[in-house]
Amino acid sequence: MSRRVFVHIGLPKTATTYLQTILWAHRDAALAQGLLLPGRERRDHLWSSRVVREEPQRRRRPDREHEAWSRVVADVAGHDGDALISHEFFAAATAEQARWMVDFFAPDPVHVVVTAREPLGLFTASWQESLKNRGTTPMAEYGRDESTNPQDIWNWRTLDLRLVLERWIQAVPAERVHVLPLDRSAPREEIWHRFVGVVGLDAAAFDPGVSFPNESMGVVEAELLRRVNPHLGAFNSAFDRGVWIRTFLADERLVPRAGEKFWPLPDQVADCRRRAEQAEAYLASSGVDVVGDVAHLRVPDTLEERRTPDSVTEAELAEAGAEIIAVLLGDARELRDEVRSLQRAEAEGPAGSSLTRAAGRLRRRAGRSRSR
């Protein structure tokens, strides 16, 4: 069994994709230093989180998904060094589910790693993320409760640092819980260096440049996506949401418009500030290991002026929608040209370089977000 098992549980929208992308791109380099990323592929950690959280639909999924947890556990058992399991959806687990997960690795010590962020930025980013997953909840109605359901990811259950720690500290002693506050003013690599320091890797063996930032939509673009989502009933699978809604529409069409930044409503800002104060008090009293400056978890006393989503007008939505339709029409023409090029190449005989390039473009169009 492993000497230590690290479980990185998020929180969501706290550089998790950034860190995971670097780690999986350098999986062999991590293993050379003794740290195993268990499983057959990156998605095994997502699928394992569904097992741990007892997702009701998991048994209807393909075998490779509901068997992922068994693969992860077997890989950890067969490795004589440290191991790291990382997915932000583990943060939603109940205390009982957390204990169930940790017990699988006894007697080896489990360390819980929590990347955290000030609640206002986290709350705003999480609403956008919910929209990229076909959410339709207006900002004014978002985050108004604390769910008891471990399937509810885009909820304070998973976003509130104190609530998450209170559950997981029932499974792992406080001294083995490591909280890394995200410094939004620092270079992106700063959180990576702190993270590898916790899990015992030499950062020099890794290239953080292989990862990418998750950029935000502007206020008009976010509200436009929210209005479009009810009409996307045919895009219901995780693959469709990831490829077409998140990547193609949101990240590649709406984000590049570089729209106006925004805040939630004033009472939601006040709630975020209250949760930040509660989290800081909990960190001070619980004995968890804080790796970084807890001040980065505070909501600033003074905020710059920004719009709120309820200020978006129908005229703004109509203009943005018209511009996006024009962009999508260009996309359709480009795709038609690529398909015709592929058909001509096939008709001319054995596949050549033009066929390979055309097929590659089509594969990239449909596959960019499968690992996200």
Image (spheres, grey):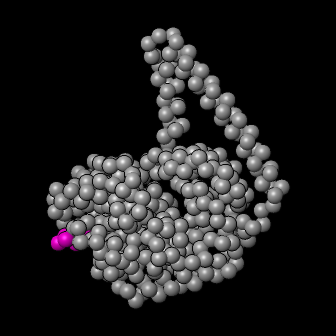
Residue 341 painted magenta: no
240 to 280, vertically: above or below: above
View extreme (bottom): residue: 285
Q: Nearer the viewer, residue 333 or 63?
A: 63
At 51% from the left edge and 49% from the top edge, which residue is drawn?
A: 237
The residue segment tinted magenta is 106-110
225 to 92, vertically: above or below: above
Is residue 36 something that shows in the picture? no
View extreme (front): residue: 60
Classify the position of the N terminus by image quarter.
bottom left
At 52% from the left edge and 25% from the top edge, which residue is drawn?
A: 358
Q: Nearer the viewer, residue 218 or 230?
A: 230
| Left or right of 343, for residue 105 | left
Q: Main secondary structure of the magenta part?
A: loop
At 40% from the left edge and 81% from the top edge, which residue is drawn?
A: 166
View extreme (right): residue: 315
Tally of numbered tags: 0
Q: Position of residue 81 (x, y in %)?
A: 19, 60
The answer to which image quadrant residue 229 occupies is bottom right
